[in-house]
Image (cartoon, grey):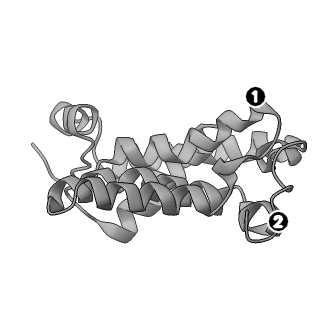
Amino acid sequence: MFIWFIALSITGVALVFDSPNLDYRLVALGSVLPVVEIFIGGPWIGHTLLLPVFVMFLIMLVARGKRLTQRKWLGLPIGLFTHLVLDASWAKTEVFWWPVMGFDSLGGSRVPEMERWPAVLVLELLGVIVACWVWRRFQLGNKGNRQAFIREGRLNELRS
């Protein structure tokens, strides 16, 4: 379940924030990072509110006084937040609010992405449709726009 997270995260963040200095590649990366937990035995810290908050805090601390650097790297925790929304991690209270709801709630079960197995295929198909819309909306068929996204993580609508 990668296309669903990447396409919808980029779309939602681009339409809500409309920031020229945000790196949308980092949004995409953040949106799929928690999926790795499929291979390590259940929902861990990637499906908690703690991880994106900690990553955001770390970025703000490390890049203190460098607003453009902060703005660029904020794409990573924003992507992590979008993952929590798109896979409905918030519905698993014990995991989402870890460690507030107890320390023994991580691991040992299935990640939210795999609990809805037949629906995953439908969500991936919807992700492909949204990705096609993003391609057209941000004119990624245009070589300049495509290179701006690949090299800098920017989405430009009207670039020649």
Residue 49: image tag: none
Q: Is residue 55 visible?
A: yes
On screen, residue 39 versus residue 160, left or right, reads right
Q: Is residue 25 left or right of residue 49?
A: left
Q: Going by the picture, which residue comes out furthest to the front?
A: 103
The one nearer the camera, 68 or 10, is 68
Q: Residues within 10 Å of mark 1 (few under 14, many from 20)?
A: few
Q: Residue at x 78, y 60 (%)?
A: 95
**Nearer the viewer's eye, disc 1 or disc 2?**
2
Q: Earlier in the sequence, mark 1 or mark 2?
A: 1
Residue 159 position within the rendered picture, expressed as x and y whole percent measured from the top left: 13, 47
Residue at x 25%, y 57% (from the top left corner): 70
Quadrant for the N terminus, please: top right
| Cα–Cα gap, marks 1 and 2 | 23 Å
Pointer 2 residue: 102
Element type at marker 2? loop
Q: Position of residue 101 (x, y in %)?
A: 80, 70
Disc 2 residue type? Answer: Gly
Q: Is residue 132 visible?
A: no
Q: Residue at x 71, y 37 (%)?
A: 37
As drawn, 26 above or below 47: above
User: 74 or 127, which is in the foreground?
Assistant: 74
Mark carried by residue 39: 1
Q: Label 1 sits on what residue type?
A: Phe
Which of these two is toward me, 10 or 77? 77
Secondary element type, mark 1: helix
Q: Residue at x 34, y 55 (%)?
A: 59
- Residue 57 in percent (x, y) is at 40, 62
Along the line of sight, the residue nearer the viewer: 109 or 9 = 109
